[in-house]
Image (cartoon, coloured by chain):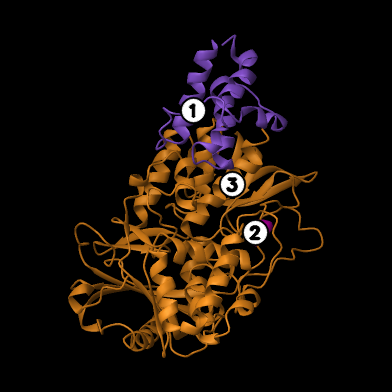
């Protein structure tokens, strides 16, 4: 079978790319390894409880009047309406360090005020940083990497404020240990602080269902349980795609959301001179608790709490199974819904070490999950009300789970720190979209698919 | 298609891309991007809709000629009069 374009992976970026191509009458097929779509952002049910993975919140929320921001941009590109995502805004989130807390909402002026109140002597510095952020074109496809730490250090003189700003931005998208590329920093800063958080009432499945429906409506073909075994190269081009069941497909162009290094590993002949991109190292463990009551009944109305137990924030692969010294506590109930969710949910995300998890036997794996669960709970109740008596069900995913469902090396959901901004590879008809292209977050992922489809398939055809 | 029909088709395309914009007061001789909030991605969509709906290829060097409604009709008239 021959296609105009084959897309590897039915995550947010692959689906968005697929919608664009199908809408403009390209013969397109998305190849998804798993039986379920969504990739990094997916969902499942156990015991009648619905769980989301990936998405804590949709970032980049802006009010309807704003037209030239990433979220409305992607809605227009996909011919969707804001109502299709059924987004409800957050209540309030907070960054908690031992000495200080910084709260933020979807009203950016509130955050500026918070910074001013907590760090009065940094007010002008913070404004100068904002100016640099506003003036920077983070979506440029050929920007050279710059250290965000260095840029922020040049404006802000209080190390505590710097650590507090980096904490949520790193957790929600940095593929790099200890630092971020400034373009990525700007994308995250705008999407989290300047814009804001929202969540569909039904969670991530709302968005995935809408994307799949739209894609099929425009005539796109989606194959699940359809892993790619090999990309066969002839004369600097992908000549054919061999699937795991040995079926062979051909296409003019191929867009892969499988990750840059992961895609290179599918090539029939190795990367000339060896692939220079570094593997991502950062992985996570997440605990999802179903609670007998709404967290608000325990006086907990915060949407997302980013906590850190010391004044220095360590964003790096831990030497242990889990690093509980920092983490993210997400409460899906605490968005401005018109009616409450069916049950209370708390999700805790901590950094974790893939290699340690990966070498355990089944038995050890199970007991290690329990050990980590206890240590994580012990730490988070210092920052949120103790909800442990209300837990009725717990599910845990580890770096191994992330690897299994996303195929990302080292269970690193944010992929390689060396992003491929323009999506080009050394092969003429193979392109990269998704997390390794470098637009971050769920909105960024969709924009990445859209931009790559526009640039490499639609614009020049 | 007549000039008026071409004009209507262009407006139809813009409306499809920007469903929230009120296009009733769009001035024919002023740059479209100065009157409605749109970015380069939206502009590119006009080009692609023309290709999808009418098989018209607008080379990148001619994008400037589609900046206002009047100039778009001028440019598209020879390409669309037989449709």
Q: Is residue A287 left or right of residue A33?
A: left
Q: Nearer the viewer, mark 1 or mark 3?
A: 1
Q: Secondary structure at mark 1?
A: helix
Chain letter of disc 2? A
In the image, is residue A44 above or below residue A165?
above
Residue identified by numbered label 3: A451
Q: Quadrant of residue A211?
A: top left
Could you confirm whether marks 1 and 3 are on the same chain? no
Q: Is residue A221 left or right of residue A271?
A: left
Chain letter of disc 3? A
Residue identified by numbered label 2: A260
Q: Residue at x 61, y 15 (%)?
A: B77
Q: Secondary structure at mark 3?
A: helix
Q: Which chain is orange?
A: A
Q: Label for residue A442?
A: none
Q: Nearer the viewer, mark 3 or mark 2?
A: 3
Inter-mark Cα distance, 1 to 3: 20 Å
Q: Secondary structure at mark 2?
A: helix
Q: Nearer the viewer, mark 2 or mark 1?
A: 1
Residue identified by numbered label 1: B13
Q: Main secondary structure of the magenta part?
A: helix
x%, y% of residue A4?
Answer: 62, 35
Asked whether the beta carbons under mark 2 and mark 1 sit within 8 Å of each other, the answer is no
- Local packing at callout 1 (Cα closer than 10 Å; few below 14, some 14-19, many 20+) is some
- Local packing at callout 3 (Cα closer than 10 Å; few below 14, some 14-19, many 20+) is many
- Local packing at callout 2 (Cα closer than 10 Å; few below 14, some 14-19, many 20+) is many
Q: Of label 3 and label 2, which has the lower sequence position?
A: 2
x%, y% of residue A28?
Answer: 55, 37
Chain letter of disc 1? B
- The answer to whether residue A156 shows anywhere in this view is yes
Q: Which chain is purple?
A: B
């Amino acid at each position: 079978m021959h296609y105009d374009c084959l897309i590897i992976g039915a995550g947010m970026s692959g689906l968005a790319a697929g919608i664009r191509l199908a809408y403009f009458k390209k013969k397109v097929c998305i190849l998804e390894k798993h039986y379920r779509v969504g990739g990094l952002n997916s969902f499942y049910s156990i015991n009648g409880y619905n769980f989301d993975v990936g998405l804590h919140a949709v970032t980049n929320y802006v009010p309807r009047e704003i037209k030239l921001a990433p979220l409305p941009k992607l809605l227009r590109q996909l011919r969707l309406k804001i109502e299709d995502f059924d987004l409800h805004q957050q209540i309030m989130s907070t960054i908690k360090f031992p000495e200080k807390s910084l709260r933020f909402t979807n009203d950016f002026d509130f955050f500026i005020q918070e910074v001013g109140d907590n760090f009065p002597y940094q007010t002008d510095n913070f404004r100068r940083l904002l100016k640099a952020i506003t003036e920077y074109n983070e979506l440029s496809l050929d920007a050279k990497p710059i250290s965000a730490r260095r840029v922020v250090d040049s404006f802000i003189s209080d190390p505590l404020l710097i650590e507090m700003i980096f904490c949520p931005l790193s957790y929600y998208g940095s593929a790099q240990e200890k630092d971020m590329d400034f373009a990525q920093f700007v994308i995250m800063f705008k999407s989290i602080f300047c814009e804001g958080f929202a969540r569909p009432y039904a969670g991530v499945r709302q968005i995935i269902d809408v994307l799949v429906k739209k894609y099929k409506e425009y005539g796109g073909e989606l194959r699940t349980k359809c892993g790619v075994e090999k990309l066969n190269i002839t004369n600097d081009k992908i000549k054919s795609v061999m699937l795991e069941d040995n079926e062979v497909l051909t296409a003019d162009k191929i867009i892969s959301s499988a990750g840059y290094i992961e895609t290179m590993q599918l090539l029939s002949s190795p990367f000339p001179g060896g692939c220079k991109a570094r593997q991502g190292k950062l992985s996570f463990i997440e605990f999802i608790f179903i609670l007998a009551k709404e967290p608000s009944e325990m006086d907990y109305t915060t949407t997302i709490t980013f906590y850190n137990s010391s004044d220095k924030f360590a964003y790096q692969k831990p030497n242990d199974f889990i690093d509980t010294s920092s983490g993210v506590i997400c409460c899906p109930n605490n968005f401005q819904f018109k009616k409450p969710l069916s049950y209370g949910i708390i999700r805790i995300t901590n950094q974790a070490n893939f290699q340690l998890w990966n070498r355990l036997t089944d038995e050890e794996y199970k007991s290690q999950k329990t050990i980590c669960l206890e240590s994580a709970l012990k730490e988070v109740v210092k920052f949120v009300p103790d909800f442990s008596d209300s837990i009725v069900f717990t599910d845990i995913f580890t770096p191994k789970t992330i690897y299994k469902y996303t195929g990302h090396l080292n269970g690193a959901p944010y992929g390689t720190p060396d992003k491929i901004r323009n999506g080009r590879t050394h092969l003429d008809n193979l392109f990269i979209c998704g997390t390794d292209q470098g637009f971050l977050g769920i909105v960024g992922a969709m924009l990445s698919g859209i931009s790559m489809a526009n640039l490499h398939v639609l614009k020049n055809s | 298609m007549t000039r008026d029909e071409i004009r209507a088709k262009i407006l139809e395309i813009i409306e499809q891309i920007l469903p929230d914009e009120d296009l009733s007061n769009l001035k024919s001789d002023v740059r479209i991007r100065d009157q409605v909030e749109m970015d380069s991605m939206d502009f590119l969509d006009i080009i692609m809709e023309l290709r999808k709906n009418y098989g018209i290829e607008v080379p990148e060097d001619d994008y400037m000629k589609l900046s206002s409604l009047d100039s778009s009709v001028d440019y598209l008239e020879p390409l669309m009069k037989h449709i």
